[in-house]
Amino acid sequence: MLSSSLLEGLNPEQRQACEITEGPLLVLAGAGSGKTRVLVHRIAYLIGACGIPPESVLAVTFTNKAAGEMRERVEKILGPEAGGVFVSTFHSACVRILRREAGHLGLARGFAIYDEADSLAGVKEALRRLGLDPKLHEPRRLRWRIDQWKNAGVLPAAAAAAAGDLDARRSAEVYAAYQRVLAEQNALDFGDLILQTTELFARFPEVLAWYRRRWQYVLVDEYQDTNRVQYRLVQQLSAGHRNLCVVGDPNQSIYGWRGADVRNILEFSRDHPDARVVALERNYRSTKPILGAASAVVANNRGPQARLWTEREDGDLVEVYEAVDDRDEAQFVIRQILVAAREDGRAFGEFAIFYRTNAQSRPFEEALLEHDVPYTVVGGVRFYERAEVKDALAYLRVLVNPADGMGLRRILNSPPRGIGKATLERAEALAAERGTTLLAALREIAAGAGGARSVTKLREFLTLLDELCDEVRSLSPADALSRLLDRTGYLAHLARQATPEAEARVENLRELLTGAEDFAAANAGVGDDERSVIELFLDQVALVSDLDAWTDRSDRVSLMTAHTAKGLEFPVVFLVGLEEGLLPHAASARDAVGVEEERRLCYVGMTRAMERLTLTFASERRRYGSRTFAAPSRFLSEIPDALVRSGSVSAPAPRRSARDPGRSLDYSLGHDSADEAGSIRVGLRVRHPIFGEGSVLAVRGTGQACKLDVRFDRVGVKTVLLRFANLEPV
DNA sequence: CGGTAATTCGTTTTT
DNA sequence: CGAATTACCG
């Protein structure tokens, strides 16, 4: 294939980022500058033009969605030849490596991957063993601390060595005990996936050498979000050949709280003195006002700023809406959506609502439901974290890895089968005493004499487990799940309840089965002889996020946090809740570093917008039951006035109707008093002499041209000219 | 032991 | 305010 055709359509900088194939390369890719495009074309160029075998290329991303997209787009250019490229997330890549090399680390191949809940339970178990009171030593805090250590690449011994005060020493002890718990249960938590891989490479150079030889070209996406262990991993893999290309944008570093270290990207050139640097500064996504507003906000952070430019001259000003409260905020946004859908013929899929915290989605969901607008919430309570889904998967987990204590705990008595707390505690004590797994302890109790009810029940459970193990092993994930839900009586138990909640759970399990079927279909033949399809399925569910399942749907409004929105784009964006304490969030706004990250988050949210950006804030908000009041976010005042239109807050007073001044609308209704004659708020109830009563959906234009969209109770939505309509307030 | 009632609890963002 | 743990009774 001709190299020129592979790089066709790229601008000079993008092209450069593809053509510098050898040695370290830093690509500073501003928002909307075609970063993915560069990564895709670079891979295609390496293979198609330079003759690099696809198997020699490793591309690492943070989300499965990004990995999938990249793989797909490379294949589109190169065809099936591209199949050999290894495109993966950090976590999936490490799982692949660890499964293969498990023996080196003393792990069994079927090790479990513990999620946050399992990990928290592990911390509690560690506390129990150390005789520490969980009331005094908050498990959540400790878990977080351990996670930070792992993100920083610190093992228990190092944590203990560096511990200054008593609290740190104790935390390090818990860390060590927690690691022992994981080891006994043949499990790794999320942080371990990366950390243990770097340990593997550090301790077994010959293993590292193999991977280095295999991956001669390494690409890393979203490099500004890498933490120290990920940095170390990337260094290990690329240290030999040094063909390392990292792509990122310091302005979009928003995961510092999770251990990401923006220095990784800022100091790339220091780490690699011979590194080449390419800056992509042309934005292809947003109009000038949007890009200008976003850039102005982020310019308040210290440090040098990349300057982005766009040729999209035209475009609406950024709109700012002051809502009375969170309900009003939601109503405003939904009405704006309805108007734009109708007036501009936009599909619902063109709209996105971004917020700081997941809890903010509720009023929007209510308003969307009220107006029959289809929507999807991305994130929040994740599907695979629902109790019933976790239960079902826990059965599979235990069948695959009998040492999985957390999984076993989950299923031991769900559905309820007469094995309660007492039996569990007895088994746990026995397991600790003998140094065996929980399952082995349970077996020992069951083998013992005595016909106590609980022991009989336990025997029944263990028999069931053994039978299931035989029956299910060779089945597909979906068949296996279906069989065990039936055989364990799990479904029957739910059906017996006959409540709406139970019904919803059954529905979720059905969805899980569908997901399992899809997985098997998509991975037909992939199940190698080493690992069953069930095991591969379990890996996948442990590593997918909600975003990965989100597909571009043209018919639904998308709701998500600004964090989740990174990497996406929408024609019309609403960034809501721009209040002090929320964005910037109070928990992050203590120090300058925290505020700067919040500011970048705001920047990320704003730069997702292609054509229209609306920012909203509410002066009053219901939060955990009670009212809270907040000032507008400082970020709002950082946007130049010239780029803002706040017209939707209030409509400037039109001429009073000379004919009937008294009966026409009193413009002082509404909440603001400072400017002009007052306002007509969206949501206001009005009466029209002919159409009757209705509520204002939207206010467009000003002065003589001010038009209202009103949904009349009797005749539906009409657009009226305020000047002529003779509206009365109701 | 199981289920329900009462109370406590915390509330940022998540691969 | 809602989830999630705990208390208590059948």
Image (cartoon, coloured by chain):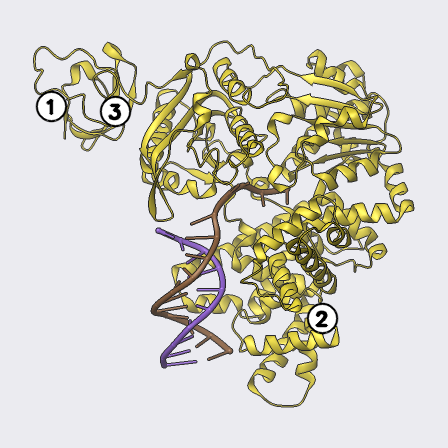
Chain colours: A yellow, B brown, C purple
Residue under numbered circle 3: A672
Residue at x 90%, y 41% (from the top left corner): A209
Q: Along the line of sight, which residue is nearer the eye, A625 or A519?
A: A625
Image quadrant holding the N terminus of chain A, namely: top right
| Residue carrying label 1 | A689
Asked whether the viewer can see residue A316, the reply is no
Q: Chain of mark 1?
A: A
Q: The residue tagged with tag 1: helix, strand or loop?
A: loop
The chain to which mark 3 is attached is A
Dot label at residue A437? 2
Mark found first going from the N terminus, 2 or 3: 2
Q: Residues within 10 Å of mark 1 (few under 14, many from 20)?
A: few
Mark 2 crowd level (few <14, some 14–19, many ≥20, 10 Å Cα):
many
Q: Nearer the viewer, mark 3 or mark 1?
A: 3
Q: Seen from this angle, which residue lies furthest front?
A: A165
Amino acid carrying label 1: it is: Pro
Tell me the chain of label 2: A
Q: CA distance from mark 2 to mark 1?
A: 79 Å
| Amino acid type indicated by mark 2 | Thr
At label 3, the amino acid type is Asp
